[in-house]
Image: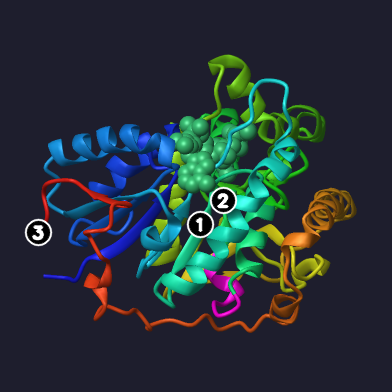
Amino acid sequence: MKRPFRIAVTGAAGSISNSLLFRLAAGEVFGPDQPLILQLIERPEAMEALRGMAMELEDCAFPLLHNVRLHDNIQDGFSNVHFAFLVGAKPRGPGMERADLLSANAEIFSAQGRALNDYANPDVKVLVVGNPANTNALIASRNAPDLSPSQFTAMSRLDHNRAKGMIANRFGCNASDIRKVAIWGNHSATQYPDLHHATAMGEPVWPELDPKWVDEEYIPRVQKRGAEIIAARGQSSAASAAQGAIDHMRDWYFGTPDDDFVSMCVVSDGSYGVTKGIVFSFPVRCRYGRHEIVQGLPIDEAARKRIETTEKELIDEKAGVEHLLPAETEAAHLNLRTTLRSGASRYGEEDTLDDSEASVLRTDRVL
Ligand code: NAD
Ligand code: LMR
C-alpha cells in the first residue's frame, strides 16, 4: 500500500472546507489509491465546529482516510505536510472589494509562511485560497526562506472554470469541449480572462465572437462573478471554490493534458513582461509536480493593456504589505530558477507529533 500523504487545510470548519474535505477524503485530488492523513487547522474558537466536521468525516468511512488530526495551531498543523490548502481567512461580504481584506488577512499568511518553512515537508506544495489570494501567497512565500517560491501558488482556477463555463454556454457545448482559456493577473475584478487562444471542440473561438460581447459582457461577468454570487447567496462562493481548489492541486500533482493549459497564480519570472516577484495568474502547464508558464502566446495591444491594469493592482497590493516581506527572500523571488525541488518527501519522522499535547485534538479512529 502507498504511504499516506499528509494534507493540511486551514479554515477547515468553514464553508469552502465543508465541500473540499469530503472530496479530498474520497480521493478526488490524489487519486483512488492514495491514503491520506488530514491535518485540519482552525482558530481556537472554531475547534468545536471542527470537531463536528471530523465526526462527519469519520462517519463517511472513507477507505483512504487514515487519520484526522485537529489543530488550533499552525506549528503542529503543518508538521510534515506534503500539501497545504490555505483556505482560512475572512471572506468579503456584500459591497466589499477583495482589496478590503488585505489588512485583515495579511498577517495570517506571514505566520503561515514561517510555519510551513519550519515544520512542513521540504517538498510541500501550497495553494492559497483565502483572499486576497495572490498577495497572501506572496506574503507566505516571502516568509519561507528555505522553500522555493515555486512551491507557493494561489487560486485562479475558479475564474478559469467560470470563464470556461460561460464560453461553453455561448457555444452551446460542454465545458470540457473548451480548451486553452487563460486568466491573467489578480484574482480580483481586474483579472483578464483571455479568449484569444481558446478553442471549442478544437476550433478557435475568437473568430466566432462579437468583440462588443467579449468586452462589455463576457469579461466583466467573469471579473465580477464572485460579487454576483455574494449578492445572490449572501455569502461567497463555496462549492465552486472547493472545485477550483481540487482541480488546481490535482493538475499540479498529476499534470495537465498536452493539448490544454490551466490558470495558476505563481511568482512571476518576468514572462510576458510581467513584473518579477509578484504572484500573478498565468496560463501554465504542469508535469512531474512542476508548473511551467506557457510561453510564446501572442498578446495584442488591447490584451497588453488589460494585463498591465491587473499587474498594477498587484504591484500596489505588494506595496501595501511591504512590511511583511522580509528583505532576505527578495532575491530568490526576483531570480527564479525553473527547477522545482522534488522527490524530497520526508516520511521517517511522521510520528514526531506529540499527541498528548492539549492543542492536538484527535478523533477516535486512528490507524
Ligand atoms: P468561512 O468564513 O466560511 O470560513 C473561513 C474559516 O477560516 C472559518 O472557519 C474561520 O474560523 C477560519 N479561519 C480564519 N482565520 C484563520 C486562521 N488564521 N487559521 C485557521 N483558520 C482560520 O469562509 P469561506 O467561504 O470558507 O472562504 C475562505 C476564504 O476563501 C475567504 O478569504 C474567501 O474570500 C476566499 N475565497 C477565495 C476564492 C478564490 O477563488 N481564490 C473563492 C472563494 C472564496
Ligand atoms: C470568488 O471569486 O467567488 C471569491 O474570491 C469570493 C469573493 O470575494 O469574490
The answer as to whether callout 1 falls within 8 Å of ligand 1 is: no
Q: Which of marks 1 and 3 is nearer the N terminus?
A: 1
Residue 240, image x and y in percent? 47, 35
Determine which residue is flagged by label 2. 155
Residue type, numbered disc 2: Met
Residue 264 appears in the picture as rendered: no
Residue 297, image x and y in percent? 72, 64
For the C terminus, the quadrant is bottom left
Q: Which of marks 2 and 3 is nearer the N terminus?
A: 2
Measure the alpha-carbon separation of dots 2 and 1.
Answer: 7 Å
**Magenta highlight range:** 145-152
Determine which residue is flagged by label 3. 367
Magenta stretch: residue 164 in it? no
Residue type, numbered disc 3: Leu
Instruction: State left or right for residue 362 relative to residue 82.
Output: left
Residue 295, image x and y in percent? 68, 71
In this view, 167 is above or below 34:
above
| Residues at marks 1 and 3 touching, judged by CB atoms closer than 8 Å | no
Q: Which of the two discs, 1 and 3, sits closer to the camera?
A: 3
The answer as to whether callout 2 falls within 8 Å of ligand 1 is: yes
| Residues at marks 2 and 1 touching, judged by CB atoms closer than 8 Å | yes
In this view, 335 is above or below 289:
below
For the N terminus, the quadrant is bottom left
Q: Which mark is residue 127?
A: 1
Residue beneath the point at 75% across and 81% down: 331
